[in-house]
């Protein structure tokens, strides 16, 4: 009976983990001033990419953000905030140059990454927070 209980317990843990993973998006979520606070509070670790349509470096960084969202699904949730359309949030976090990534842990601002930096550098900065 102990072996059967161990199998059941393991299977239940797998089901729970799969359900939790399913609630994490595998691509960046579009956020605005209206839903920003709710978004950063919803997940334990959130990175918000602040960008604008006209920004060349922002467009260069976009595929990296997409890759990271897929690669770190279940650990980090990525958001995209258009600074032209979400000026209140941009002003609140003093975004003066883009691309800029705002990092939140448990809803609290813990840092930022400025510029179109390589994927490895982003991971290096986020690794201690995971």
Image (tube, helix red, strand yellow):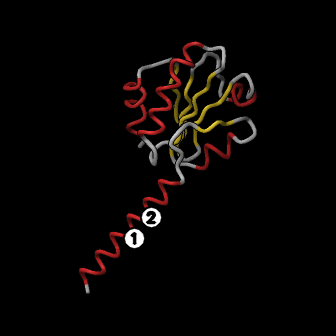
Q: Position of residue 117 (x, y in %)?
A: 45, 19
**Looking at the image, which residue is at 50% across and 32% down?**
66
Position of 15 relative to 127 (above/below):
below
Q: Position of residue 121 (x, y in %)?
A: 39, 24
Q: CA distance from mark 2 to mark 1?
A: 6 Å
Tag count: 2
Residue 7, quarter of picture: bottom left
71 left or right of 38? left
Residue 72, quarter of picture: top left
Local secondary structure at mark 1: helix
Task: Decide: few, some or many residues near mark 2? Use Cα within 10 Å; few <14, some 14-19, many ≥20.
Answer: few
16 left or right of 52? left
Most extreme residue toward the bottom is: 1
Q: Nearer the viewer, residue 5 or 106?
A: 5
Local secondary structure at mark 2: helix
Q: Position of residue 127 (x, y in %)?
A: 38, 37
**Looking at the image, which residue is at 53% across and 28% down?**
112
- The residue singled out by tag 1 in the image is 12
CB contact under 8 Å: marks 2 and 1: yes
**Looking at the image, which residue is at 30% across and 80% down?**
5
Q: Disc number at residue 16?
A: 2
**Looking at the image, which residue is at 67% across and 46% down?**
38
101 left or right of 87? left
The N terminus: image quadrant = bottom left
Position of 17 relative to 1 (above/below):
above
Q: Position of residue 94 (x, y in %)?
A: 66, 23
Q: Nearer the viewer, residue 60 or 106?
A: 60
Residue 128, quarter of picture: top left
């Amino acid at each position: 009976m102990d072996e059967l209980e161990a199998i059941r317990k393991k299977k239940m843990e797998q089901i729970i983990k799969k359900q939790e993973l399913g609630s994490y998006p595998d691509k960046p979520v579009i956020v605005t001033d209206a839903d920003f606070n709710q978004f950063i509070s919803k997940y334990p670790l959130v990175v918000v990419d602040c960008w604008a349509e006209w920004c060349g470096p922002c467009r260069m960084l976009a595929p990296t953000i997409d890759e990271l969202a897929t690669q770190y699904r279940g650990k980090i949730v990525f958001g995209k905030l258009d600074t032209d359309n979400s000026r209140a949030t941009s002003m609140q976090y003093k975004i003066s140059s883009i691309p800029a990534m705002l990092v939140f842990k448990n809803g609290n601002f813990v840092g930022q990454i400025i510029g179109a930096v390589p994927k490895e550098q982003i991971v290096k900065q986020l690794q201690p927070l995971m």
